Image (tube, rainbow, N blue to C red):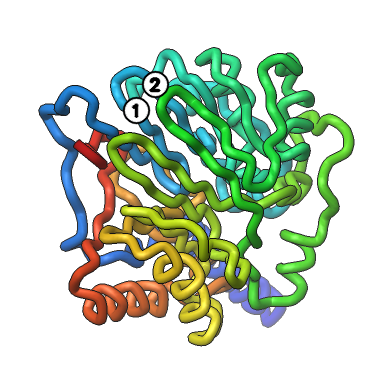
């Protein structure tokens, strides 16, 4: 009788733990940005204007009416369990939906800011579907080779060597990826060497190494901007650059120390003296491709922490710098960046 009762209690406990795990893997936290910064898409776009569309993480589509190019081009959203214990590959249906939502049929280039799965995994397929050149590091090129992309459709970037794409002049600046505060996580995510041979998916998420991490400076007759896709920095690397707008990656920033956050702000935003800051890479890596942006699921938020610190940091900077306009972009909608 006692054994049955203990077995019953054990089953109840296991069921409760399973229910809690399901809840934590399917419940999303709020995005760590001020809702008051949100703007809507522009219905009318003036001739010659530079526009941007945001798909989430660091996927950005830029256009001046003549030329369109994309950062990252990542639309797959593998779930937490698959990321942790399974293998991943580009989700062709999600890529099709993402390109359609951005009204994309043809691109001049797609450029991952580094080679982790949430930046570079889908880029070869995006390039294949749109006729784009795949621009990036040698590691990104090996991801392209593993997907069967022809060599003629890839170009390996060189540090501070500008690339012209239509009227856009793109300068890749080798920088550092966000430095995870947990040593074990940092070693697993950043310690793998660059790829020297093609990577053929499906593979584990961590089989996508960081490769080179770039900050992108873009100049155009209409204006200039900086894209910091990962919250890492090199001291003094941007001193010779100016940008009207900074797309500021803030993923994981709250989990770092206050000193790290201040150094990051100083070496990115303050270094280029912008008039506008647009946070990116703050949304869930496992959330739906469509709909409002969400923060990480509860399980990942508990493991990584720092969501509240990220939001507080950004709010404090907005209050301390009233001359800076803080903006968050809608998903997929076209927003005029420069008229």
Horizontal placement of 143 versus 95: left or right? right
In x, y percent, where is residue 293? 33, 50
Q: Quadrant of the N terminus?
A: bottom right
Q: Quadrant of the C terminus?
A: top left
Q: Is residue 167 above or below residue 36?
A: above
In x, y percent, where is residue 78? 57, 42
In x, y percent, where is residue 212? 71, 49
Residue bearing mark 2: 67
Could you give the CA–CA distance between mark 2 and mark 1, rounded to whole angstroms? 6 Å
| Residue found at the far right of this picture | 196
Secondary structure under badge 2? loop
Q: Is residue 178 above or below residue 121?
A: below
| Residue found at the far left of this picture | 44
Determine which quarter of the picture holds residue 4. Answer: bottom right
Residue 63: image tag: 1
Q: Given contact means CB atoms under 8 Å apart, are the residues at marks 2 and 1 in contact?
A: yes
Q: Residue at x 88, y 33 (%)?
A: 197
């Amino acid at each position: 009788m006692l054994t049955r009762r203990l077995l019953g209690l054990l089953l109840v406990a296991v069921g409760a733990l399973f229910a809690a795990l399901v809840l934590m893997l399917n419940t999303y936290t709020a995005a760590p940005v001020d809702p008051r910064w949100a703007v809507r898409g522009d219905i009318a776009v003036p001739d010659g204007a530079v526009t941007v569309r945001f798909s989430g993480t660091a996927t950005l589509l830029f256009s001046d009416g003549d030329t369109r190019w994309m950062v990252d081009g990542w639309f797959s959203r593998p779930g937490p369990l698959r990321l942790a214990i399974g293998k991943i590959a580009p989700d062709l249906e999600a890529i099709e939906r993402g390109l359609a939502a951005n009204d994309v049929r043809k691109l001049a280039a797609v450029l991952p800011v580094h080679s982790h799965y949430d930046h570079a995994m889908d880029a070869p397929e995006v390039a294949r579907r749109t006729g784009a050149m795949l621009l990036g590091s040698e590691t990104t090129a090996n991801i392209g080779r593993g997907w069967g992309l022809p060599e003629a459709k890839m170009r390996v970037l060189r540090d501070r060597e500008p690339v012209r794409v239509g009227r856009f002049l793109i300068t890749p600046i080798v920088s550092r990826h966000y430095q995870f505060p947990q040593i074990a996580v940092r070693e697993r995510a950043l310690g793998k060497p660059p790829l020297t041979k093609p990577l053929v998916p499906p593979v584990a998420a961590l089989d996508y190494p960081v490769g080179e991490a770039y900050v992108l400076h873009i100049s155009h007759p209409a204006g200039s901007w900086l894209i910091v896709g990962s919250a890492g920095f090199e001291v003094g690397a941007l001193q010779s650059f100016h940008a009207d707008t900074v797309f500021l990656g803030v993923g994981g920033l709250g989990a770092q120390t206050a000193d790290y956050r201040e150094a990051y702000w100083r070496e990115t935003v303050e270094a280029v003296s912008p008039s506008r800051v647009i946070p990116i890479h703050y949304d869930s890596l496992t959330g739906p491709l469509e709909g409002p942006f969400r923060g990480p699921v509860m399980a990942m938020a508990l493991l990584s922490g720092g969501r509240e610190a990220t939001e507080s940091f950004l709010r404090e900077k907005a209050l301390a710098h009233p001359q800076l306009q803080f903006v968050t972009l809608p998903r997929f909608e076209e927003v005029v960046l420069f008229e």
